[in-house]
């Protein structure tokens, strides 16, 4: 009852790697999730207005911000 089986240790190691694994993986995942939610909300607003153009789509905004971050 008090001991941990190997599968429990594997799960603990996985959680530790996700939380503390190099270069802020958890913050990167949360940032990507936040960008996705933001793009979804922007898409809903544009769909409600009926004035979505190709240059104002959330996908174009996300891709342009990725290009700026790389360069």
Image (tube, rainbow, N blue to C red):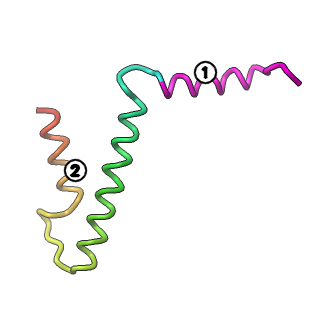
Compare marks 1 and 2 and give the one earlier in the sequence: 1
Q: Residue furthest front?
A: 2
Q: Going 29% across and 58% down the picture, which residue do you hit? A: 39
Location of the C terminus (image quadrant): top left
**Residue position marked by numbered label 2 in the rendering:** 62
Q: Going 14% across and 64% down the picture, which residue do you hit? A: 56
Q: Is residue 60 magenta?
A: no
Query: For numbered disc 1, what is the local secondary structure?
Result: helix
Name the spot of residue 43 as percent of width and height, x first. Answer: 28, 67
Residue 60 appears in which quarter of the rendering?
A: bottom left
The residue carrying pointer 1 sits among few (fewer than 14), some (14 to 19) or many (20 or more) residues within 10 Å by Cα, namely few
Residue 51 to residue 18: above or below: below
Q: Report the number of numbered marks.
A: 2
Q: Is residue 50 left or right of residue 30?
A: left
Magenta stretch: helix, strand or loop mostly? helix
Q: Going 30% across and 56% down the picture, which residue do you hit? A: 38
Name the spot of residue 12 as percent of width and height, x first. Answer: 64, 24
Location of the N terminus (image quadrant): top right
Name the spot of residue 19 as percent of width and height, x first. Answer: 49, 27
Residue 25 to residue 34: above or below: above
Q: Is residue 62 left or right of residue 19?
A: left
Residue 48 appears in which quarter of the rendering?
A: bottom left
- Image mark for residue 13: 1
Q: Is residue 17 magenta?
A: yes
Residue 51 appears in which quarter of the rendering?
A: bottom left
Q: Going 39% across and 41% down the picture, which residue do you hit? A: 30
Name the spot of residue 26 as percent of width and height, x first. Answer: 43, 32
Which region is colored magenta? 1-19
Q: What is the distance, in whole Å, between disc 1 and disc 2 at their CAs?
A: 33 Å
Residue 46 to residue 14: above or below: below
């Amino acid at each position: 009852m008090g001991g941990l089986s190997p599968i429990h240790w594997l799960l603990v190691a996985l959680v530790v790697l996700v939380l503390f694994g190099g270069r802020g993986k958890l913050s990167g995942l949360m940032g990507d999730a936040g960008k996705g939610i933001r793009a979804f909300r922007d898409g809903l607003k544009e769909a409600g207005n009926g004035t979505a153009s190709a240059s104002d789509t959330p996908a174009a905004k996300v891709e342009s911000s990725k290009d700026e971050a790389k360069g």
